[in-house]
Amino acid sequence: MTPLESMWLSFIGLGLMFVSAVTALLGKEKLSGFLRFIVLSFSFICIIIAGLIVLVVVVPGSRADL
């Protein structure tokens, strides 16, 4: 993976973390019932995907051969 691809992938991960935080706050404060469950489930899925993206970007680390 090139550094540019890694950068864009990390931006997507950061965006998913932001979406997860906003939807979690919305679900906890403003919603109730089944809609709350759907929004909080979406938030959980976003944070799981963001965590996997972070692992993909961070674990290989920096490469000196580029």
Image (cartoon, rainbow, N blue to C red):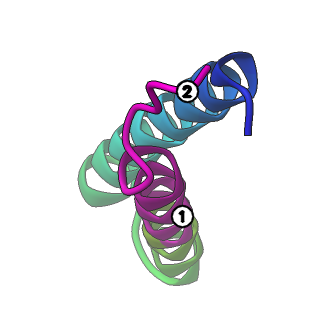
- Is 66 displayed left or right of 26 in the figure? right
Indicate the quadrant where residue 9 lies: top right
Task: In this rendered view, identify the residue nearer to me: 59 or 39.
Answer: 59
Q: Tell me the residue that label 2 is attached to.
A: 65
What amino acid is labelled 2 in the image?
Asp
Please name the residue shown 53% across and 31% down the image.
10
Task: In this rendered view, identify the residue nearer to me: 34 or 42.
Answer: 42
Residue 32 image position (x, y, % from top left): 40, 70
Q: Which residues are magenta?
A: 45-66
Give neighbour class at mark 1: few <14, some 14-19, many 20+ (Cα, 10 Å): many
Please name the residue shown 55% across and 26% down the image.
65
Give neighbour class at mark 2: few <14, some 14-19, many 20+ (Cα, 10 Å): few
Between discs 2 and 1, the one toward the N terminus:
1
Quarter of the image with the C terminus in it: top right
Above or below for 51 versus 35: above
Residue 18 image position (x, y, % from top left): 42, 32
Please name the residue shown 29% across and 45% down the image.
25
- Is 49 displayed left or right of 30 in the figure? right
Instruction: Please name which of the two marks, 2 or 1, marks the residue nearer to the observer.
Output: 2
Identity of the residue furthest to the front in this view:
65
3D distance between C-alphas at marks 2 and 1 = 43 Å
Above or below for 11 versus 26: above
Question: Which disc is residue 18 wearing?
Answer: none
Quarter of the image with the N terminus in it: top right
Name the dominant secondary structure of the magenta segment: helix
What amino acid is labelled 1 in the image?
Val
* Magenta span contains residue 53: yes
* Magenta span contains residue 41: no
Q: Tell me the residue that label 1 is attached to.
A: 39
Residue 2 image position (x, y, % from top left): 73, 28
